[in-house]
Image (tube, rainbow, N blue to C red):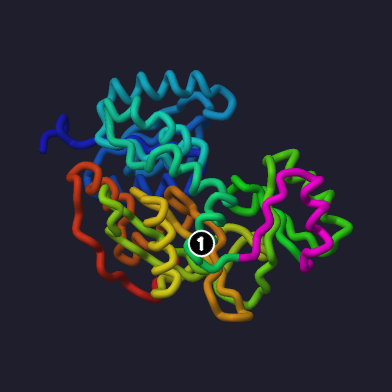
Amino acid sequence: MSKQNIPKVFVTDAEEGRIPLNITRSLGRKEIKVYVGGDMKIATPYYSSYCTKKVVYPSILLKPSQFKKFMLNYIKKEKFKAVFPVMNETVLFFSKYKKDFSKFTSIPLVDYDKMLLALDKANTLKIAENIKIPHPKTYYPENTFELKQIRDDLVYPVIVKARRSSGTLGVKLCHEKAKLMQIYGSILKTYGTPIVQEYIPDGGDAIGVSCLFGYKNDVKATFAHRRLRQYPIQGGPSTLRESIRHPVAEALAIKLLKKIKWFGVAMVEFKIDPRDNKPKLMEINPRFWGSLSLPIFAGVDFPYLLYKLVTEGNIKKIGSYKLNIKS
């Protein structure tokens, strides 16, 4: 293949570090040119030997109109095979404007309405409730008045959680009724209307089920992992995890994503409730996830599989992977 014919892919959000770095390595090892973009001049993925070109663009949060203009012009000019958005805001943007960008490249994301369902924890949990997927008992007060109506009925501690957030941002544990209004108000001010959830006791594993769905809402790959360590230790992104099989959690994740009519990648998070040993749904991560290196090491190369899917239209289902691999 001549240099002119080597396919190119654009990966966003370089400043996030480990996720775009793992995507870059995955695709670069397959001799795909990877252009890595971000709104910072210095970011880890730029220095990967698999990064073909560093691209600095306007901040999507600070300069949204300039960001859109830049992306339309740059993607039209460079003729990428696909664009892989990485973080929530960028994923939401490309999902919203997928029709505009699809004239020039492949955008491997679900439509905007489905992305909103997955990114909003309240919407996700209401769907789960309708199709009988176990989850923490959840309340959806729209304001402090509605919260006052239910606070005496809650069993403390409870979790107050932003409807749209990632990691531990916008998530606080409330141990007593007297602190509930203050915690709710602080999250409301910063992140918008939160939900209030039953606290699942410690003692059970945290399980992630990663999936790739094809164009016909068919499962192309699944992968399960168990968290071994996280930072902060009280609750945060995993820092060590292990490849496993968990048929119950895998079936629940597939059931939920099929209900939404998913396409592309997603990771569904569960916590095992030690009171009944059942996996309880926490949230959907509707994009590439922080522990992406693990499935790649274990034999499920999600970035390359997604690339093959969008460039060839279909791929064979991945049936197995290495167990007990740690990353």
Q: Which amino acid does label 1 sit on?
A: Glu
Image location of residue 46, percent across then percent down: 42, 38
Residue that mark 1 sits on? 269
Q: Give the range drawn in magenta.
A: 136-156
Q: Residues within 10 Å of mark 1 (few under 14, many from 20)?
A: many
Q: Is 250 within the magenta?
A: no
Q: In which quarter of the image is the C terminus?
A: bottom left
Q: Say whether residue 213 is visible.
A: yes
Please state which of residues 41 and 312 is positioned toward the viewer in this rendering: 312
Please state which of residues 181 and 239 is positioned toward the viewer in this rendering: 181
Above or below, 65 relative to 38: above
Q: Is 139 within the magenta?
A: yes
Image location of residue 73, percent across then percent down: 36, 19
Residue shown at the point (27%, 52%) measured from the top left: 305
Q: In which quarter of the image is the N terminus?
A: top left
Residue at the far right: name it: 178
- Whether residue 99 sits left or right of residue 269 in the image: it is left
Above or below, 10 relative to 232: above
